[in-house]
Image (cartoon, helix red, strand yellow):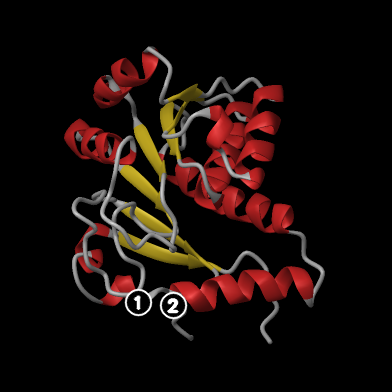
Amino acid sequence: MWIATSDQSRAIDRRASDEFGIPAMVLMERAGLAIFQAVREMLPNGGSITVLCGRGNNGADGFVVARLARDHDFQVECLVASTEENLGLDAAHQCKTSLVHGVQPIFCNDARWARRLEALGSRDLIVDALLGTGSRCELKEPILTAVRAINRSGVPVIAVDVPSGIDCDTGEELGESVWALRTITLGLPKPYLFQGTGLDHAGYWTVDEIGFPSS
């Protein structure tokens, strides 16, 4: 199996849409379903989960997870490390869809944001959908506070594609990073899974191909 860098991963996403006609939203639905299946494996009898979403495509995947979990009667909390106005287009679309299904996102400019981060330790499972494979710079607020709260909680974490705060290509930490119990990486394995801090922080990792054409 090939290993894909962050640039190669973006190219695969782009080609899947442009050359093979697979809409980005379809890929996000498949990614969200893969993560949700991992949630069900870890909590077969249901329970409480908190999904932490960023403003980009990783966050969009997180909104899909929150919606699917809500549809299957999990107790779902969705904390968004962005204001609603700053969400990317795909994340904004998935956020609106999740609202229709009863998810009630709490954005970082909401007075409840800090309180809910402090209460993460009471949850059964956390899904880290804050940052994706394109992250290169040291963590800034509100992501940094969210990552610290996740690690402080002591709750098992599933990371979407890459633990937030890990450089996808080098495996090095971008100041601080999430300690995941499990990571579902999408499409192909990434370099961070084999080197640097990423080797440890990814936990038990698996690959979900989400339907990219083999060519």
> Which residue is at the far right?
21
Left or right, 58 with reference to 177:
right
Q: In the rendered image of this protein, does residue 54 appear above or below residue 72?
A: below
In the image, 85 versus 144, the foreground residue is 85
Q: In the rendered image of this protein, does residue 88 appear above or below residue 69?
A: below
Check residue 5 in the rendering and tell me which mark sits there, or answer none: 2
Question: Which residue position holds label 1?
Answer: 191
Amino acid type for the residue under numbered disc 1 = Pro
Q: Is residue 148 visible?
A: yes
Amino acid type for the residue under numbered disc 2 = Thr
Q: In the rendered image of this protein, does residue 138 appear above or below residue 2?
A: above
Q: Residue at x 32, y 43 (%)?
A: 157
Q: Is residue 212 visible?
A: no
Q: In the rendered image of this protein, does residue 157 appear above or below residue 75?
A: below
Q: Secondary structure at mark 1?
A: helix
Residue 169 occupies quadrant: bottom left
Mark 1 nearby-residue class (10 Å; few <14, some 14–19, many ≥20): some
Check residue 18 in the rendering and tell me which mark sits there, or answer none: none
